[in-house]
Every structure is written in structure tokens, then in C-alpha cells.
Amino acid sequence: MSLPSDFTWGFATASYQIEGATEKDGRGPSIWDTFCKIPGKIADKSDGSVACDSYNRTAEDIALLKQLGSKCYRFSLSWSRVIPIGGRNDPVNQAGLDHYRKFVDDLLDAGIEPFITLYHWDLPDGLEKRYGGLLNRTEFPLDYENYARVVFKAIPKCKNWITFNEPWCSSILGYSSGFFAPGHTSDRKKSPVGDSAREPWIVGHNLLLAHGRAVKVYREEFKPTDKGQIGITLNGDGVYPWDPEDPADVEAADRKIEFAISWFADPIYFGKYPDSMRKQLGDRLPEFTDEERALVKGSNDFYGMNHYTANYVKHKTTQPEEDDFLGNLETLFESKKGENIGEETQSFWLRPNPLGFRNLINWLSKRYGYPNIYVTENGTSIKGENDMPKEQILQDSFRTKYFRDYAKAMAEAVSEDGCNVKGYMAWSLMDNFEWAEGYETRFGCCYVDYENGQVRTPKESAKEMKGIFDALIK
Ligand code: GBH
């Protein structure tokens, strides 16, 4: 069991979760700045205005990455730093663009390969206010294309581009449950606006169009000279049928992945939505025009995989609810036989199950023709970590074991099953703003002391990472 010598590994972060400095150098507000101000949306009433202060500590973060032996670093750009209002006729903010260009130069000088995510959920608020942001099928893809072009042009040295992080989350959490910005949902106790039966599927479609446009621009205008690669990052959990003897549960387990991943990956690899989704959603799922299909089909140079956990899947026998987004099924932590999926963590949705990772890498590889895969996020929280004394937080052996087991499962998928995983980025380099959960849930391999000047201290897991990969890479 091993990984090839050119395998790359490192850590990942996202702009709104770490940067802070939300009003510095001409940055415009994003939908997350706005969302955090609504009472009741963030568990600890916090926001990303300071976070890890990474905007002001680029040298420190690069030194940290270097110290940990990280070969690559995945981070995201704040669109509203580059174009404060966001639109294609709005002014570009040179200071914001220069910041990211210098950051890439400095990473490369330190021997660390950058992976840039163009969009990790922080849409310029100006576009939300102007035309409803991601809901707009014509304006949003055009403004995103323009933003992508501005960035590609300014940062030719970056060779790895991710268009969108987890469009599932933007669509479902942003427009069905309302758990994430902009918080739309049919539940009028939570939001005055939203239609959970329709909006998430429209938003998902528009994100695919925007992805397709940015990839076309990169391939036509930049790739011939810059020679980089571009793809999308999708999230999805491992699955086991609740009752492996019941064909309806076996089918539901596949359907769970189709609703989470194939919703986006089927249009990108095959030019159509999965039959299971069309069957359940009917005309609530948009149709691709011929022009749109041409844009989206074939638009991945690699597959970006975010992965954390697994579930037992049980089919439902009733008709799907209008706001169902799982595929008319239940997800459970226990199987029919009473097997447990994994230990509890601080995150209600996350329980470690490394075999689920190996299985899902295989599922994706078979369905999409063994594409190159980069694992762009993988990691865990720890139950009660935030309430522990610092000395104990630094001994995060639960997290170290998680990484060891998951890296091994991935190496088996590569060397024993023939899957093409090319790189791996742990979530996250450091504790950060965990969206609706605020700072109470820590996903970092480095501890951030929010009370004392955002000082970073590597936890055991950060220090062990190099050894984990050195042992696997041949
Ligand atoms: C990642 O998403 C994010 O990309 C990253 O920013 C974040 O910090 C990290 O996770 C840790 O949370 O039960 O309907 O509320 C991980 C994928 C998908 C996990 C949605 C949580 C909750 C589904 N996420 N899931 S729901």
C-alpha cells in the first residue's frame, strides 16, 4: 500500500474563515458579513471580522506551512476584495488583487504549490442586493466569468484552480435549510424569503453554468500559455445500505450519492442530471439548453473531492416531501444489525469511517472514468475540544488517528484499486470560523488562541502529518 512519488499533500483553508480584516484595503462586504449580523444565525454570535487575522499574517502562515512540510496549500480568494461590488462593470480593487498575487509569489518562493479556490461561499453582497446573487441565471454566471478572468490574468503563476467549493452547500444550506448565507428557506419562522422546493435546484444549475464559463475562459485564454489545470470541488459522504439484504436500501445508498455528488458531476462528465433526480424533482430541476450543456459537459480537468464521514442509508416508503433534498431516504449512524458507523465528534454530522472514503473514491472513479482526483478537504472535529485546556487540545491524538486511517484508506484506493488520487489537503491548517457554528468547533491541525492575539500552535496532528505521508509516498 503506497502513494506515488509525485503525490502532493498539504493543508486547506477558506478566505472568510481565516482572513479577518473585512474592511481593509477596500474589501466590499460579502453575504457572510451580512448573514452574521442577523440574530440567531451564528451559534456564538460571532463573525469573520477578525477570525485568524490571516490577511495580516501571510508571512507567518507561510512559515507555518513550511515548518510542517506542506508541499501545497489550498486557500480561497475573497471575490469582494478583488471586485468590491462584484459585477463585470464594477471597479477592480488593485490592492486586493495585489495581495493575492504577492501571496502566491511568496508561497512559490517557499516551495509550496498554491491551489486557489475562486469561490468558497463569500459572494459579494453587492450582487445579492443587485439581482439576487446565485438565483440569477444570466447575470451571475457572467459576473463570475469576469471575476475569474481578472484573477487568471493577475496570477498566471498559480497552476491549480478550483472554481467552486461544494456547490451542494451553497444550494441546499443557502436556499433550502437556510442554515448558511443568504439563509433562504420555506420555513417562515427562519426567513421571510425562500422556496425550498425550487430555489436550491435553480442555484445549483446557475453554479454549474458559472463553473462552465470560467473553465471555458481558462482553457481558451490562459491554459495554452499558463499550462495549469482547473476543476470543481464537490462534497459527499460515504454510504452503506442500512440493510444490505434489501435491494431498496442498496439502491437508496447509490441515490444518496447521486443527490449529493452526481447532481453536479453528471452534468460535468455526461451533460445531464441523474435520472433519479429528474424522477423525483420533475420540472423543479432546470433543463440544460443546448448551449448550456455544451458549456458544462467536459468541464473538469480534475475532480476535487471534499470528504469527512459516512452514513447508513435507509429508503423511505412514503412519497418525498417537496423540500426533500436527500433522495427520499434516511441517513443513520447505526445499521439494521446494530453496527455503529464511527465515534462521535463535535460535529453532529461527522463520524470517522475511513473505509467509506476508500469506497467512495472507488465509486467516483468507476462512474466518471478514473479521473484525476485531488482530495481538497478531509478532517475532523473532536467532541468537547473547545472546552479542554490548551495543553490537552495540543494532544489531538483522535485527529491524528483520523488522518492516519483516512490517508491509509486513500493509499489503498490508489495502489490496490487503481484510482488516480494525485493530492491531499487536510482541513484545516488552523482552527477557524466554522460558519454557523462560530468558533466553538475547531477543525484545525494548529491551535489558534483567539483570546491572545490569534497565535498559532501546531497540534500533534499537524506535526504528525509529514510522517504520515512520508511513510506512504514511495
Ligand atoms: C466543509 O464542508 C467546508 O468546505 C469547510 O468550509 C468547513 O469548515 C468544513 O467542512 C468543516 O465543517 O446536516 O444538512 O446540515 C463539509 C461538508 C456538508 C458537512 C454539509 C456538513 C451538513 C449537512 N459539509 N454537512 S446538514
Image (spheres, rainbow, N blue to C red):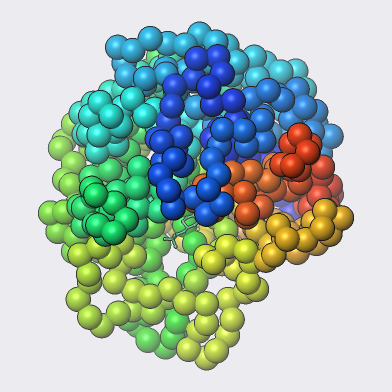
Residue 82: % across, % down: 47, 18
Residue 346: % across, % down: 62, 64
Left/right placement of residue 425 relative to residue 209 reads: right
**In the depicted structure, whether residue 99 falls above or below residue 119:** above
**Camera sees residue 307:** yes
Quadrant location, the N terminus: bottom right
Residue 464: % across, % down: 83, 51
Left/right placement of residue 137 relative to residue 314 reads: left
Q: Nearer the viewer, residue 19 or 415?
A: 19
**Image point (30%, 32%), residue name:** 128
- State which quadrant residue 80 falls in: top left
**Image point (42%, 17%), residue name:** 83
Left/right placement of residue 382 relative to residue 400 reads: left
**Image point (53%, 22%), residue name:** 23
- State which quadrant residue 160 falls in: top right
**Image point (29%, 51%), residue name:** 191
- State which quadrant residue 432 falls in: top right
Residue 345: % across, % down: 64, 66
